[in-house]
Each structure stands twice: as C-alpha cells, then as structure tokens.
C-alpha cells in the first residue's frame, strides 16, 4: 500500500481485513484518513482481500 | 491478512440506494458520491447565505493554494454560485518554494480552469524583489509566520483592488478547531473572535472574509476534492514546522471524534454561536481602526505590519507598490473578459 503525502510504501498484515483495522494498525484515526482502492474511496467497515493494493491519504496535510 | 472471509453486500446510500462512498457518523448517513457532494455543498451554501454573499452581482475572490481545501472550495463555490449570479475569481500566490510551489501553481490553475473560474497569479518573489524565506531570515522570524503575514496582506490588497465583496479562504472545520484550541491553550481568547465563518468589510480598508468550509471537516474536504475530480496537490509545504501544535490538536480531535461522533461538528457550531461572546471579550468595538500611512489599507497603528516588515527587510514599504501591480493585473483581467 501507498501512504500519501509522504509517498511511503508498506505492507500490512491484517486479522479481520477491515479498512478500519488497516488504518488503526498504521496509527491513524479513521476520521483523519481516506483509503482508496482502484480510484474508489472505501468505507471503514469494508473488507479488504489478500493482496489488495490501496492508497491511504492523510487528510491533515497539504491544505 | 489471514483469510478471505467473503465479500458482504456493499453498503448503500441512505438516500438513493446507490453504492456508498462515505459514512457520516455524526449525521447517521451513508452516502453515494452524488449525495455526499450535495451534503457538502449544502454546508457551503449555508455559510454563504448567512453571510449575505448569495446575491446577484456579488464578487467573491477565492484564495487558491492548489491544495485539497482550495480545490474543494472552488468546485463547491462554482456549483453553488452558478444559479445565483455571484462572480468568483481565483487568486494564487506563488511562494517561490521550489518544486512545491511550481506544482502548487499548476494545481491551482487547473482547479480554476476545470471550474471555469478566471485565475489571477501573483509571483511574490517577483513583486517583492526577494524570496519569502529571505524576508523571514532578515526579519529573524519563522518562515510560516512571515509567509502568513504576507499572504494575508496581499490577499486583502487584491480583494480591495478587484472590488471584491468577499475573500473566500479554504480553512476547514479541523483547521478552525485547531487554531481556536491553540488560542485557548495560550489563553488568547480575543484572537478567537476573528475565527467565525465570516467577518465584516471595513470600507476601502479591508474586505470581508468568508470561510465556506467552516462546517466541512478535513476528511470531507479531501473526499469532496477526490470525488469531484478537482485537481489538487497533496504535498506538505517544505517550510512547515516538524510537528506544529495544530497537528497534535487535529490528531487528538480525530481520535475523540472516532469514539464520540459529533464532537467536532458540535464544537464548530457552538463556536459559531459564541463568536459574539468572544468579540465582547476582545472588546472589538473599541479597537481603533486606522489606515496605514504608507499603503492606505487597514492597520493597527500608523503603518501596517506588512509595510513595516518590508521597510525593515527590503528597505522600503511595499504596500502601495503591491496595490499598483494588482490594479494593473485586474485591468488586464477586465479587458480579457470584455
Ligand atoms: Zn445517493
Ligand atoms: Zn501598509
């Protein structure tokens, strides 16, 4: 996955596979980020699948 | 990720049943792209209407940095004002911070172009004769504070010269919360008085400010910019301090918000209704409004802070010159339109 705006690329192992879990594992609050997959913003309770490549936008930057 | 658990049916929009792209927990809504955008535009429209800005012939100068907030603000303004006969003009200030500024300028011009909004571009290094960071160095002040002072001055000067009725700034709800919490932590309660959704004009000295994204959170602003396909630059300014207090406040508020949805929007709405109270604390009626003797714009003393800064660091007060440059740019814009 890719984290913007710092362009950090990383891989995260998840248990439930929910978007919320991904966001929390990276140390963010769901209220502060948007996770996009194939150009579509995901909801916090959406299920990710093995090998999914997503982009996480930190909202609190680049105003 | 352990194992594939099977895909649940995708969430649906609470209004139309189309696939959802956003949850708005504090409003108990799940929205599709179209209804999310309408939800945001209603918030923006409310700010404009309350400030009396939605009248035919009103001219709005939008400060466009090229970031997500100005992108979201521009598109929302363009959509809302279309049917109201309100004119929107964009203003982008080139800060001269290397590739960051070049990309910001491209994004700002693109965001204006896709919205059919004319864009005035002003290169600060060119008009000031020195880069912003050099002025900051000479003033022995942080780049951010000098940059902020210069931007505030130039934006107001541009609004006066362009005959704008309002300046629209892209501060979102999280920004406003972070600024005011910081002011509270410093017990600078008087400063909070200036952070309502709009301020009043002072004849020929200062143009009223509007904050169209006042009730739009940072996440909503970013999502709106993405969903509306408005071009924006998602990058950090190279001169931003490592961890500004504002960012800590935002992180804290976002954690609280996730556990207690509605905290941020309630804060913003109460702040809005308490602004009159803060004005009383600030004794705003007793502020003596003066005119800068160098440039003729609003000042707290004989000379405004911008003219004092440029006199001290560049050898001469630049206010009057900046006003002339903008007047010429404005004349060029008027002939192009006719
Ligand atoms: Zn819908
Ligand atoms: Zn002045």
Image (cartoon, coloured by chain):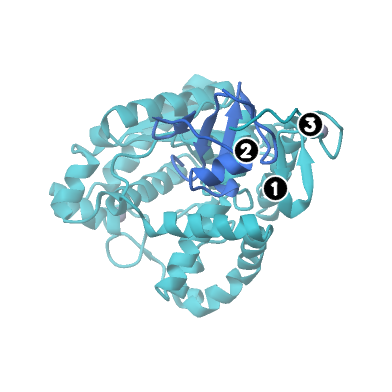
Q: Mark 1 falls within which chain?
A: B
* Real-space CA distance between mark 1 and mark 3, rounded to the nearest whole angstrom: 32 Å
* The hue in which chain A appears in the rendered picture of the protein: blue
Residue identifier under label 1: B43
Q: Residue furthest front?
A: B2
Identify the element where label 3 is drawn. Answer: loop
> What's the mark number on residue A19?
2
On the image, the x and y values in percent for residue B144 come to 30, 50
Question: In the drawing, what numbered circle is on residue B192?
Answer: none
Q: Are marks 1 and 3 on the same chain?
A: yes
The reply to whether discs 1 and 3 touch (Cβ–Cβ < 8 Å) is no
Residue, x 45% and y 26% (percent of image)? Answer: B107
- Badge 1 crowding class, 10 Å Cα cut-off, few under 14, some 14 to 19, many 20 or more, is some
In front: label 1 or label 3: 3
**Badge 2 and badge 3 both on one subunit:** no
In the rendered image, which residue does mark 3 sit on?
Answer: B8
**Secondary structure beneath disc 1?**
helix
Q: Tell me how far mark 2 sits from mark 3, CA to CA.
A: 13 Å
Query: Residue B47, percent across and down?
Result: 66, 51
Q: Secondary structure at mark 2?
A: helix
Q: Quadrant of the rendered structure where residue B99 is?
A: top left
Residue visible at 35% across and 33% down in the picture:
B122
Horizontal side of B204 relative to A21 (left or right) equals: left
Residue B264 horizontal/vertical position (percent) = 62, 59
Q: Is the distance from the Cβ of mark 3 to the nearest ligand 1 atom less than 8 Å?
A: no
Q: Chain of mark 3?
A: B
The tint chain B carries is cyan
Rendered residue at 67%/63% (across/down)? B266
Q: Earlier in the sequence, mark 1 or mark 3?
A: 3
């Amino acid at each position: 996955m890719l984290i913007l705006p710092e362009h950090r690329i990383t891989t995260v192992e998840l248990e439930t596979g929910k978007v919320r879990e991904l966001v929390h594992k990276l140390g963010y609050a769901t209220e502060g980020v948007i996770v996009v997959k194939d150009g579509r913003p995901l909801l916090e309770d959406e299920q990710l699948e093995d090998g999914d490549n997503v982009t996480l936008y930190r909202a609190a930057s680049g105003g | 990720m352990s194992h594939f658990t099977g895909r649940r049916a995708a969430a649906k929009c609470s209004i139309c049943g189309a696939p959802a792209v956003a949850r708005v927990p504090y409003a108990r809504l799940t929205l599709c792209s179209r209804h999310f955008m309408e939800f945001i535009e209603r918030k923006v429209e409310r700010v404009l209407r309350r400030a009396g800005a939605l009248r035919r012939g009103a001219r709005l100068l939008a400060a466009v940095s090229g970031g997500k907030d100005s992108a979201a603000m521009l598109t929302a303004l363009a959509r809302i004002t279309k049917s109201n006969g309100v004119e929107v003009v964009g203003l982008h200030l080139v800060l001269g911070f290397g590739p960051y500024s070049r990309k910001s300028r491209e994004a700002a011009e693109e965001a204006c172009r896709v919205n059919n909004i004319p864009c005035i571009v002003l290169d600060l290094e060119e008009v000031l004769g020195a880069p912003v960071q050099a002025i900051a160095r000479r003033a022995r002040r942080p780049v951010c504070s000098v940059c902020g002072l210069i931007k505030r001055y130039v934006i107001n000067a541009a609004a006066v010269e362009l005959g704008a009725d309002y300046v629209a700034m892209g501060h979102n709800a999280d920004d406003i919360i972070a600024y005011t919490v910081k002011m509270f932590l410093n017990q600078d309660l008087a400063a909070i008085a200036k952070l309502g959704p709009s301020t009043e004009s002072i004849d020929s000295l200062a143009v009223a400010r509007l904050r169209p994204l006042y009730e739009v959170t940072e996440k909503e602003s970013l999502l709106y910019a993405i969903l509306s396909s408005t071009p924006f630059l998602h990058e950090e300014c190279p001169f931003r301090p490592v961890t500004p207090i504002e960012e800590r406040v935002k992180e804290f508020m976002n954690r609280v918000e996730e556990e207690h949805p509605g905290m941020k929007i309630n804060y913003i709405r109460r702040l809005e209704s308490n602004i009159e109270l803060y004005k009383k604390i600030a004794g705003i009626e007793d502020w003596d409004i003066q005119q800068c003797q160098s440039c003729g714009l609003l000042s707290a003393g004989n000379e405004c802070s911008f003219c004092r800064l440029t006199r001290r660091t560049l050898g001469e007060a630049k206010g009057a010159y900046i006003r002339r440059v903008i007047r010429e740019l404005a004349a060029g814009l008027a002939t192009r339109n006719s």
